[in-house]
Image (tube, rainbow, N blue to C red):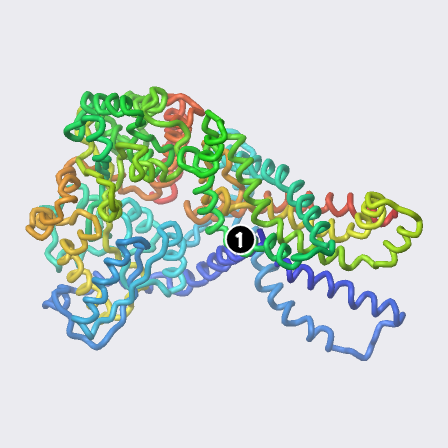
Amino acid sequence: MESIERALSRRRFLGVAGALGGSLALAACGGTSTPPGATDATGTAAAGLSYDGPNVTLQFWTGWTGADGQFAKQMVTEFNKANPKVQVQFAAYQWADFFQKLPAAVTSGNGPDVAVMHIDDIATQAAEQVIVPIDAIATALGFSAAQFAPAVWNDGVYQGKRYGIPIDVHNLGLFYNQDLFEKAGISAPPTDLNTYMDALDKLKGIGVQGSWVSPFQFTGGMMFQSLLWQYGGDLYNADTSKATWDSDAGIKALTWMVDLVKQGYSPANVAQDADYVSLKNGKNAMNWQGIWQVNDVESLAGVHIGLAPLPAIGGKPGVWGDSHQFVLPRNGSNSSDKQAAARYFIHWFTGREAEWAKSAKVPALTSLQSSSAFQQLTSLKAFAQEVPAVHFPPAVAGIGDATAKLYDAVQSAVLGHSDPATALHGAASAANGILSDNMQKYG
Amino acid sequence: MDATAVARRASHAGPVRTAARRGVPRRAAGATPYLFLLPYGLLFVGFIAVPAVYGFWISLHDYDYLLPHQPWVGLRNYTDLFQSGSRDGSDFWNSMKATGVFTLFSVPFLVTVPLGLALLLNRKFPGRTFFRAVFFTPYVLGVAVVGVLFRFLLDPNLGVVNAYLHDLGLSSTIPWITQLPWAWVSLVAMTVWWTSGFNAIIYLAGLQNIPAELYEAADLDGASAWQKLRHVTLPSLRPVLLFILTLTILASANMFGQSYLVTKGAPANLTRTAIMEIGQVGLGEYRQGAAAAMSYLFALVLVVIGILNFRLLRGRGDAA
């Protein structure tokens, strides 16, 4: 236990030291940050189409710790070889650590020059002044709304300014165990409530609990959100002042999940990741899982996992999804050369989204989604098909703190600690308090 | 921190004893003692005293180190915690309760099991060094490794433990990490497995410091093994016991990694500990003011427990 204590005292120290250093740094450099995008865009270098300045090194931070990090590293190496003047140094931190490290680094003036984050973190990080507007780069690179699915493009904007340039979309899909399907005599992956329940009954016939329900955010929380949209609900009202997941649609969605457990289509007390592990080892037949696991299931020997769009249980199309976006940390590139190099790197990388897609993502650019390079990645087709139905959390600062309450509610109901309606109502009222706090804090 | 604590104890004891023996305080030393104290003094002031005061200052604000303005809120971060229906009140006290439950159930095992181990390992038998190493080994592992390991073992539907129980004829599935009280059983058990070796080593050191003459005298008086344990070993171990008890209470109260990795706070945040909650509020939600207030309350509780602990054990020791 000493190692925990050591870690904690270090954590506490870092927290306090970070806070101390932070306030000093704030006093020292408040207002000195120049948003890289603020420089006038003229010529191809300014537009990020090329780079011809002196040699620079860029720090590039991401949360890609898994297989996608290996892909990104390869792409960065490729970039470094092709562009000796710009050397990019790639770093990956666990997402949870990333959002502790990045603000601290930015505040102390040691932030990276370019970073990647999820679309639903952009508003919070913009409000916390960790990242700066990127409008000019988007304009210079010629990106516009028409090139992307609406949510992918629009949610990168906070308070009228763009902070994110879309890299990819990664959404849920239906992962199903083809071997079990064959054994149970199911010919095609289910597409709606009836075919889903029919498949579950057939699976029950061969002694398989066919749709394990996870009580955790991964994947239960994401499954719930997909169902919520399918039943016609939404997470928040239009101006994000109230949580609306406790609507009839929400209660129907969560009740359906809980009933899967009650009716024995899922075991009770599923642990973290067990829903997915069981799919691979043939104990579970269907899992609402993220596209990022595609390469993992394809590498399995002797197990056949099929991929299909999520079934429309609630009638309407609705899919949980998220998007990686390029952002520019404040205080990152203080020299105009670095800013130009960063623009060029973003341009280069986004132009290779089809290659990035091989790390199991859907390219953000709709043109690339239909490109032959991407079409060759047949296993990802089902996910690309769903993109128009993908929903992201709203681009509101601090929204993650409110949505965390929803995950508590899903867990509470799936583990049988409270009924769906009570859990959702309680979580919504707690979230409403947080939303009004946030509105006061971030304006 | 254990090593420094030991060193600190030693350095406390040292000078006092020498001064007492000589009877007169040395005068000519001048600045020398202070110069010796300076390095640690600087560290202490820089990394403990100043942050501690600054942390209290933070707790009086709606603090977010990333934003330019830190609105003054006085004691509101504290009073909010005692108000029902406030944002953090129920979550914080739930996490305090979880921490209390874990401490209450883990400390007795973490104090007694290692004592038993140390008594066994203190005997002379072939392979003693090997077994000493074996019992200490888990402690070398990081919490991340231990966490992953126990998740594999304890997964209710896929884990090894339930698979064996099933083979032994147990029909129901025990939700080791997703329901109470099982989650507590698992967290306590894995902590005992993981950290007993450390406490056992301290006990061993204590046992080896007990003068052999005491046992010889007891033998001459015809004391049984039990009487020797009861009247020689345990009283001699009292300072070590106090040290271990204090350290273990603090360590258990600071429990974070096990819950964070194995149960993730499930079910319904009932195994979410105070440190998890404070970390979430301060570093996850960027509300350092509220998190600092929680930390100070939490620290206050630990201080009170620490004082009680010393009073109880030391009082008896002095009387005897």
| Nearer to the camera, B85 or A367 | A367
Q: Is residue B54 visible?
A: no
**Residue B83, position as x, y percentages in the image:** 54, 32
- Identify the subunit bearing mark 1: A
Looking at the rendered structure, the secondary structure element under dot 1 is helix
Q: Quadrant of the N terminus of chain B?
A: bottom right
Q: Quadrant of residue B210?
A: bottom right
In this rendering, would A327 be left or right of A344? right
| Nearer to the camera, B95 or A196 | A196
In this rendering, would B8 be left or right of A338? right
As drawn, which residue projects farthest toward the bottom?
B28
**Residue A166, position as x, y percentages in the image:** 19, 51
- Compared to residue A50, the image places residue A136 above or below, namely above
As drawn, which residue projects farthest toward the front?
B126
Taking the spot 68% from the left edge, 71% from the top edge, the residue there is B37
- Circle 1 packing at 10 Å, graded few (<14), some (14-19), many (20+), is some
Taking the spot 41% from the left edge, 58% from the top edge, the residue there is A104
**Residue A307, position as x, y percentages in the image:** 19, 38
In this rendering, would A254 be left or right of A179? right
- Compared to residue A316, the image places residue B221 above or below, namely below
Q: Is residue A288 visible?
A: yes
**Residue A15, position as x, y percentages in the image:** 49, 55
Q: Quadrant of residue A386?
A: top left
In this rendering, would A212 be left or right of A2? left
Number of on-image labels: 1
- Compared to residue A210, the image places residue B123 above or below, namely below
User: Which amino acid, by three-letter code, is at mark 1?
Assistant: Leu
- Compared to residue A249, the image places residue B194 above or below, namely below
| Nearer to the camera, B254 or B88 | B254
Taking the spot 53% from the left edge, 53% from the top edge, the residue there is A8
User: Disc 1 marks which residue?
Assistant: A8
